[in-house]
Image (cartoon, helix red, strand yellow):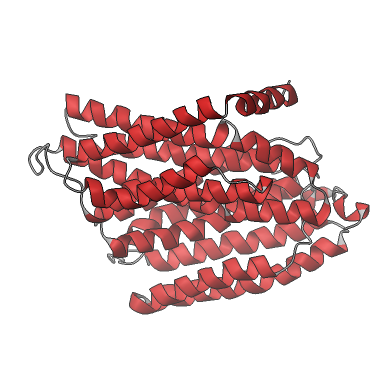
Amino acid sequence: MTAHADRPPRAGRGRARVLPTTEHHTVTTLELFFDLVFVFAITQVTAFMAEDVGWRSAARGLVVLALLWFAWCSYAWLGNQARADEGVVRGAVIAAMGALFLVGLAIPEAWGDEGGGLSAPVVLAGAIAAVRLLHLAVYVLAAGEDAGLRAQLGRTAVPVVAAAVLLVVGAVLGGTAQTVLWVLALLVDYSGMYASGQNWRLPAPGHFAERHGLIVIIALGESIIAVGVGVTDLPLTLPIAAAALLGLTVSVCLWWAYFDVVAPVAERVLARKEGRDRIRLARDSYTYLHFPMVAGIIFLALGLKKVAEYVGDTEHHALTDPLEGTGLWALYAGVAVYLLAHLGFRLRNTGSVNRPRAVVAVVLLLAPLAVRYLPALAQLAVLAAVLVAMLSYEVVRYADARARVRAEAAAGHG
């Protein structure tokens, strides 16, 4: 990639004005506003899976989450190319917010429209398609005179349009056909985007890393909200308070695991890369490897929501009742997937593996078999204890390296 390829596009004029970003560009308030709509949608995904907990609802929730993820990622890339709060890009982001809000409203009936109004599956599919196609159209304007980026957008349009058609057709057909076509749409979209090339631009690596760090924070916020929503109509009791604090402990541990060392190191590695090496690293580390992180947190939120219901709803559950089935696996496997994604994230950025986290991830994948007879609150306590022990070991074992990384991060932000 030449130096010209890294040059931001020229600002347009009039209504199509585009303000290119610079190396020191940071997240705009409009992007944060955009994320609020996204968090509503993922909150709806958690509620959708919790309504009828089972493997089928979990799989469907994962499909919807995957659709939402690429919709969000596409605007993270666009906002790195041109300021999201200026000119035509501002209008596109606001329009995309409206479409994503409709997606969130349609999620509860994504596979079972109740009638009496608009078809929820069609609204969801059509709105996702609109978000993605609008993104491509505005990206062409943001590309300016950059012929290489315009060619990249042309190649990318093929899987995006194909996926959009599959989504809409599946929504119209409904039933098993809907599930098959929506999964096929995801396969086309995710594989097609990966294979379409690396001729993108990433002028502001700090902005890109910050965007994805913020979305991890938003997902962790959903894990906290899930506990509160699960006991909203119930009186505050000691078991409910314990469940809430244990759930918060788990969420804090996941925050620590990401932001204490891994995130600042990854940001610096990304900033040091240039040209296509930077594009490939951003694509792999953030666009693809952050999805299992977010998905793991959402499944954790599902598990936390069910624990809160078990310890709070004494009319239907005794305090000695264990969390079972999908709820239990979501609680433990969600965190395991999050840690496994961290392992991939670190491996892709530094070429090294965090062995303690690898061990803990395997332990958590097997743990549901060992704790399945414990009360739900005890199951959550075991999860929290394992994570606290893991982080405590890391703080002591890697004290010097951790201090050095955090000092460098502080100096970089000073």
Give how far across and how far down residue 33 sits, in percent. Answer: 56, 39
Q: Residue at x 71, y 26 (%)?
A: 408
Residue 411 position within the rendered picture, expressed as x and y whole percent measured from the top left = 73, 22
Can you see residue 236? no
Camera-side residue of 362 and 123: 362
Q: Report which quarter residue 71 is drawn in.
A: bottom right
Point 77% across, 50% down: residue:
15
Total numbered labels placed on residues in the image: 0
In which quadrant is the C terminus drawn?
top right
Decide if residue 230 is on the left or right side of residue 93.
left
The one nearer the camera, 368 or 57, is: 368
Front residue of 121 and 387: 387
- x 34%, y 59%: residue: 58
Residue 177: where, in percent of width, then height?
Answer: 39, 79
Residue lying at 24% horizontally and 27% vertically, measured from the top left:
242
* Residue 135 visible in the current orientation: yes
Q: Residue furthest front?
A: 397
Q: Give residue 388's position: percent from left, percent from top.
A: 40, 30
Is 53 displayed left or right of 408 in the figure? left
In the picture, measured across the screen, residue 399 lies left or right of residue 386, that is right
For the N terminus, the image quarter is: bottom right
